[in-house]
Every structure is written in structure tokens, then in C-alpha cells.
Image (cartoon, rainbow, N blue to C red):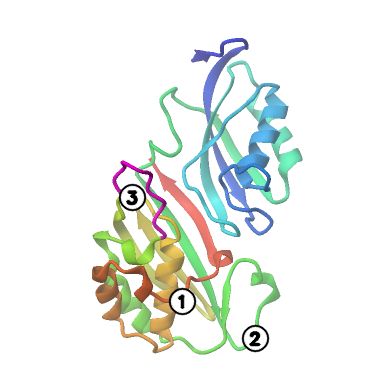
């Protein structure tokens, strides 16, 4: 438990948050634009009547969704969490919903305590679109060779440099470039009728990594690349060799492990 300089004693909470990312400019707070963290910060601060700064396990891009984003924050230690959850949801629903809230250890950090994250990317592979998947799946009309896409998964499992699949953040003068090394624990495609779902689990993800990987895999499914090109492009560490990004609305953060 901590005490703010001019306010009540504070304690750490852990929230599980789901959101439809369609109307937001990503998760991270950003002055002048509507973001998930900005909206949630404002609502939580209003409810507990003290400024709150939330931390998320993953910084999802504009248009990306989450079923189980994990958020940590410090709130007054005497807060009624059931009432906090109810009130925040009243302010944020339907696009943002706190699914669960509980007290956490004071050293818990949604981002730095996380050991892995799992994302899913959904593709509707059908001649006609589905209005019920409009905001959550990438519609591709031409039949995809799913077996080739599955073969391509093997190349990215393990610890690799994903420079070819990531948007590198700017490097300040005097600093070393950020590492693009990541450890992928799982990568697989599942198919249920016309719906394909890509599951990927890693210790962390760099910017646009999943969308970039999916974009290349769909090109492989369309015969524009061979499954073996996945490893070749990854080893090249050259983002210019990769396919166009998959659109953001098919991507969803589904689980964070601690």
C-alpha cells in the first residue's frame, strides 16, 4: 500500500478489460485522440475521485480488439471494487468493459510482470462477406491454401529476430536500436468452416508483428509465396521484403500470462 502526497492511501488493482477497438486510436493514451487507455483512465479517475494512471499488458494498435487485456492501476485502498467495476462500465460500455477487478500485490505491473501474451487473428475465407464478422475478421474471397499457411508456422516458432515483421521504433541519439528479438511459443492456424483463426503466443510482440506475419501467411495461402519463404524473409531481417500488413480489425488480444 502506498500513500499519495496529498490524497488517500492507495493500493494496486488488476483489471481484465475487453474492448472493441473499432472507434479508438489504439490502446495507449494519446493527447487529442480517443484511445482505450484514455477513456478508461478518465472513467476510473472519475469513479474513485482521484487521478489514476493505468498500465496495460499490451499496446494494441488502432482498430485492434481485446478480450482479456490486463490493466494495473493504483486506487484508494478503501474503494468498493464491485461498485468501481459497475460504475466504470456504466461510463465506458458498450465498447469497453471491465470484466473483472481485484486487489493485487503492490509490485504487480500489468506490462512488466507479464510472461507471455496470446493473440488471435481471424480470417473469413468465403465468397461473400458476413455482416456479423464485419469488424472482427479480414474477409478474403479467393480460396486459401490452408495447408501451406500451416507449414509456414514452423519457421517462426522459437527465439528469432523479427526485424522483417516489425515496425522499428525511432532511436534517440546516443541510444542503441531496440531489439527485435522475440520468443514465439505457439503459432498455428485452425479452420472451422469458412473461418480461419491464427493463434500466436510469445513472450512479447513488437509493433505490427502479428499483422505483418499474417499478411505474409495470407500471401502464402494465395500462392504468392512458398511456405519456405517465411524463414527466408525472417532471416533476411529486411522489412521491405514482406507482404502488406493484414488489416487491424481481425486482430484480438485474448490472453496474458503471469
Asked whether the residues under the numbered discs 3 and 1 touch, taking CB atoms below 8 Å apart as contact, a structural biologist would say no
Question: Does dot 1 land on a helix, a strand or a loop?
Answer: strand
Asked whether the residues under the numbered discs 1 and 2 touch, taking CB atoms below 8 Å apart as contact, a structural biologist would say no
Percent x, y of residue 198: 44, 68
Give neighbour class at mark 2: few <14, some 14-19, many 20+ (Cα, 10 Å).
few
* Badge 3 or badge 1: first in the primary sequence: 1
Give the mark toward the camera: 3 or 1: 3
Query: Which of these two is toward me, 255 or 172?
Result: 172
Give the mark toward the camera: 2 or 3: 3
Count of labels shown? 3
The image shows residue 114, relative to residue 26, as above or below, that is above
Left or right: 187 in relation to 126: left
Percent x, y of residue 92: 72, 43
* Badge 1 or badge 2: first in the primary sequence: 2
Inspect this view and state whether residue 58 appears. yes
Residue 184 part of the magenta segment: no
Percent x, y of residue 12: 51, 24
C-alpha span from label 3 to label 1: 25 Å
Specify the label residue 128 is tagged with. 2
Judging by the rendered image, the residue that carries numbered circle 3 is: 203
Specify the label residue 37 is tagged with. none
Determine the residue positioned at 61% across, 12% down.
Answer: 8
Magenta span: chief secondary structure:
loop
Image quadrant in which you'd find residue 83: top right
Determine the residue positioned at 31% across, 61% down.
Answer: 162
* Badge 2 or badge 3: first in the primary sequence: 2
The image shows residue 35, relative to residue 105, as above or below, that is below
Asked whether the residues under the numbered discs 2 and 3 touch, taking CB atoms below 8 Å apart as contact, a structural biologist would say no
Magenta segment, which residues? 167-178
Judging by the rendered image, the residue that carries numbered circle 1 is: 191
Percent x, y of residue 231: 25, 73
Amino acid at each position: 500500500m502506498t500513500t499519495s502526497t496529498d490524497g488517500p492511501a492507495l493500493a494496486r488493482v488488476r483489471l481484465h478489460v475487453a474492448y472493441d477497438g473499432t472507434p479508438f486510436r489504439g490502446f495507449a493514451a494519446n493527447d487529442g485522440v480517443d484511445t482505450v487507455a484514455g477513456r478508461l483512465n478518465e472513467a476510473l479517475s472519475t469513479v474513485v475521485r482521484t487521478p489514476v494512471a493505468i498500465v496495460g499488458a499490451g499496446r494494441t494498435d488502432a482498430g485492434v480488439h481485446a478480450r482479456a487485456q490486463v490493466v494495473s492501476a493504483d486506487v484508494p485502498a478503501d474503494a468498493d471494487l464491485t461498485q468501481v467495476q459497475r460504475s466504470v462500465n456504466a461510463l465506458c460500455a458498450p465498447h469497453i468493459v471491465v470484466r473483472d477487478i481485484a486487489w493485487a500485490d503492490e509490485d504487480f505491473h500489468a506490462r512488466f510482470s507479464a510472461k507471455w501474451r496470446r493473440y488471435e487473428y481471424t480470417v473469413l475465407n468465403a465468397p461473400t462477406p458476413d455482416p456479423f464478422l464485419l469488424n472482427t475478421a479480414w474477409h478474403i474471397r479467393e480460396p486459401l491454401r490452408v495447408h501451406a499457411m500451416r507449414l509456414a508456422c514452423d519457421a517462426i516458432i522459437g527465439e528469432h529476430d523479427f526485424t522483417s515483421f516489425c515496425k522499428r521504433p525511432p532511436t534517440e541519439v546516443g541510444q542503441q536500436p531496440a531489439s527485435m528479438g522475440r520468443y514465439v511459443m505457439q503459432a498455428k492456424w485452425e479452420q472451422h468452416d469458412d473461418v480461419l483463426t491464427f493463434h500466436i503466443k510469445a513472450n512479447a510482440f513488437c509493433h505490427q508483428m502479428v499483422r505483418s506475419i499474417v499478411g505474409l501467411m495470407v500471401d502464402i495461402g494465395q500462392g504468392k509465396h512458398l511456405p519456405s519463404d517465411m524463414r527466408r524473409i525472417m532471416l533476411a531481417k529486411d522489412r521491405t521484403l514482406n507482404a502488406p500488413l493484414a488489416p487491424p480489425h481481425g486482430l484480438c488480444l485474448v490472453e496474458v500470462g503471469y
